[in-house]
Image (tube, rainbow, N blue to C red):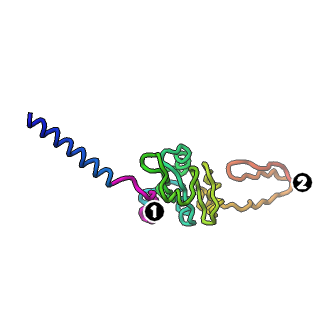
Amino acid sequence: MNDQKMIVGGLIALVAVGGILFVLSGSPSSPTVTNNTASSTEATASGPNVALAACLKDKGVVFYGAFWCPHCKAQKALFGDAVPALPYVECSTLDGNSQTKVCIDKGIKSYPTWRFPDGTELTGEQQLETLAQKASCTDALPGASASTSQPSISVTPGVKTTITTGAATGVSGTAGN
């Protein structure tokens, strides 16, 4: 009987110590901010949107969200494997029931919220092109290295000319004299 009491008492003590350690570790009072250096970004982020994510971060844009938010998950999905390079701030406490102090102090009311250095913000899911334009990061969009200038067109009279821009055929016809 004494052995059983000792075992039960030991188990209760272990659970109590574990609970104390858990409480002491607590939920973070500050948000998790992805703050990658160039070398760690290259090691953890990949894909065609890394340059855009890095540009947004370099321009001082901040993405506020919550781990439980379906719109935040969809927003991250647009960035694919480049998510670790995003300037992301987690606003939810670990239990999902409260907001972190930094997000309260910043006045974040909905997720996702994209805040720009000029104080403006966009809320809700945003297209990559919208974010790139707002942050002047359009050169960082995938495929942006291709020439965006208008094509030069030479037309010879009497010869059928087809103008092709990208994947679509533009104008086809025969030039007159």
Image coords of residue 117 (percent x, y): 60, 65
Q: Quadrant of the C terminus?
A: bottom right
Magenta-colored segment: predominant secondary structure: loop
Q: Residue sitting at 44 percent across and 62 percent down?
A: 36
Residue 66 in the image, given as x and y percentages of width and height: 50, 49
Mark 2, residue position: 176
Tell me if residue 51 can be seen. Answer: no
Residue 37 is covered by the magenta coloring: yes
- Residue 44 spot, x, y in % from top left: 42, 57
Q: Which percent across, then down, holds residue 70? A: 53, 43
Neighbour tally class for label 2: few under 14, some 14-19, many 20 plus, Cα within 10 Å: few
Q: Amino acid at mark 1?
A: Asn
**Extreme residue in the right direction:** 177
Element under label 2? loop
- Count up the numbered dots: 2
Residue 120 figure quarter: bottom right
Distance from the alpha carbon under mark 2 to that under mark 1: 61 Å
Q: Which mark is residue 35?
A: 1
Helix, strand or loop at disc 1?
loop
Q: Please, is residue 125 above or below residue 138 in the view?
A: above
Identify the magenta region: 25-41
Q: What type is the residue that disc 2 sits on?
A: Gly
Q: Residues within 10 Å of mark 1 (few under 14, many from 20)?
A: some
Determine whether, in the image, residue 163 is placed left or right of residue 98.
Answer: right
